[in-house]
Amino acid sequence: MTNLHRRALVGGLTASTLAFSARAGAVTDTDVIIIGAGVAGISAARQLKSAGIRAIVLEARNRIGGRVYTDTQTLGRSFDRGAYWLHNKATNPLVPLARTKGIDLLESSYDNGNIFHQGAPSTNPSWKDATEAVAAWEMRQLLPLARLNDRPLGATLPNPSPAQRHVANIFAVEMGEDPSLVSLQGYYDLEAGEDLIPINGMGPLVLGLAGGLNVRLNSPVSTLRWNDTHGVTAIGNFGQLTARKVIITVPTGVLARGAIRFDPPLPSAKQTALANLPMGALEKVAMMLPTPMPDLPEYALSNSHIQQGQYHALVSASDKGMITALIPGPVSRALHAEGAAALEAFALDVLKNVIGTQARIVASSSTNWQGDPLALGSYPHQTVGHANAREIYSQPVEDRLFFAGDGGDDPLAVTVGGAWRQGQKAAQSVARQLSNGRR
Ligand SMILES: Cc1cc2nc3c(=O)[nH]c(=O)nc-3n(C[C@H](O)[C@H](O)[C@H](O)COP(=O)(O)OP(=O)(O)OC[C@H]3O[C@@H](n4cnc5c(N)ncnc54)[C@H](O)[C@@H]3O)c2cc1C
């Protein structure tokens, strides 16, 4: 018998042992399976570990972090391809955790911005006009109206003035999507405040929080059987794994696309909720400057592009040696379809309108979240008329399937802070049920 055959036999024995334990309904491989090792999955796993509950995290990628990914290779310095800010520092659960880990956090503020036209500050509108338009929009107290009758976020700015187009630009960059596709009510439910930036990127923070957890990389779940007597069975290239409960943290757009086959299928209310939490299309282009530009504000916007609906924000790194374009929605989709060169050419065009036609860069790199099958976009928004989609998505199914992630029902939804809290919450519910002996 060759080694190959011996391995096959061992594999076969393992599989049949697992199948037996599944039928017996008493023994499972672990108490809880967590699908996805992004922020929500890591948070859930930490919570379960602290409660003394066995959990295995199955992650399709060859790395931890999901849409948190600090790339230090491509440009020879850190480039957060996904999340960069810890939004709303006052309530973000990752802020105290970062401090505990001794990670320095830089202050960040949209107030430190300016609008440019052909290399000079814009006068129509000026930065002051645009910030006043934001304040005026907030003062209109749209929330009670939104509660009565949901409408597109973009419809709150009919026939926008030049200054109001900058308000629409904020919506688009924040939600990664054309504001006419986003629920006003869903937007208004989100908390906002001052932000912080982990000094060496978001990746090291999340990786540091994943230490000591049982994470299995390169393990995509293809099928989830959830009516077994013992609980649930996850099936994939790793074979089968049984547990009493599962926490699913896969992005809503990926679930809606059917990347995991649920057996039996998910209830129709859950499927409808997933369909109404589509992913936005924010892509980033990082551009390395030949020499740092200390006078660049943190946020720089090109007025002519924004007046044409080519929404974006340029964000300068704290050392002013790199500037990153954030490109959301339809423009991002169209450029993405043309390829990385088109995205990078657009970003450079915006940069030229900001700092002048003499603008030069020495290297650039763009993201591809829309083409990433494990993300299918940037982050989810609620569609118009479905402002309850986050709530329905977050509800467990038959006390076996638990859902967590940035599509969850949280004031910090669509951010790492919300994903972290949702992972923790799902794990707390699971822990309560397991300690009460509920299956
Ligand atoms: C360009 C961009 C910029 C952003 N900027 C910010 C920001 O500045 N601040 C902020 O707070 N948020 C930001 N976000 C959003 C933030 O990244 C997400 O809200 C957060 O990372 C979501 O975490 P999650 O755990 O819910 O999902 P994910 O990070 O997507 O984790 C889910 C995991 O599931 C895995 N997976 C998928 N399918 C399977 C399968 N079948 N089997 C096993 N594993 C699977 C994925 O590989 C992934 O690792 C940004 C996102 C993008 C894309």
Image (tube, rainbow, N blue to C red):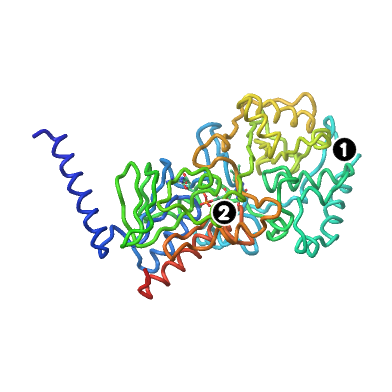
Q: Does label 2 point to a residue whose CB lies under 8 Å from ligand 1?
A: yes
Instruction: Looking at the picture, tell me which residue is in the foreground, 227 or 48.
Output: 227
Instruction: Looking at the picture, tell me which residue is in the foreground, 133 or 370.
Output: 370
Rendering coords of residue 103 (x, y %):
54, 54
The mark tally for this picture is 2
Q: Is residue 76 above or below residue 91?
A: above
Rendering coords of residue 199 (x, y %):
58, 49
Circle 2: element type: loop
Instruction: Looking at the picture, tell me which residue is in the foreground, 176 or 185.
Output: 185
- Choose mark 1 or mark 2, whichever is in front: 2
Q: Is residue 205 above or below residue 120?
A: below
In the drawing, does residue 205 fall left or right of residue 330?
left
Gap in Å between the C-alphas at discs 1 and 2? Answer: 36 Å
State the residue position of label 1. Answer: 122
Q: Quadrant of residue 125?
A: top right
- The residue under label 2 is which amino acid type? Asp
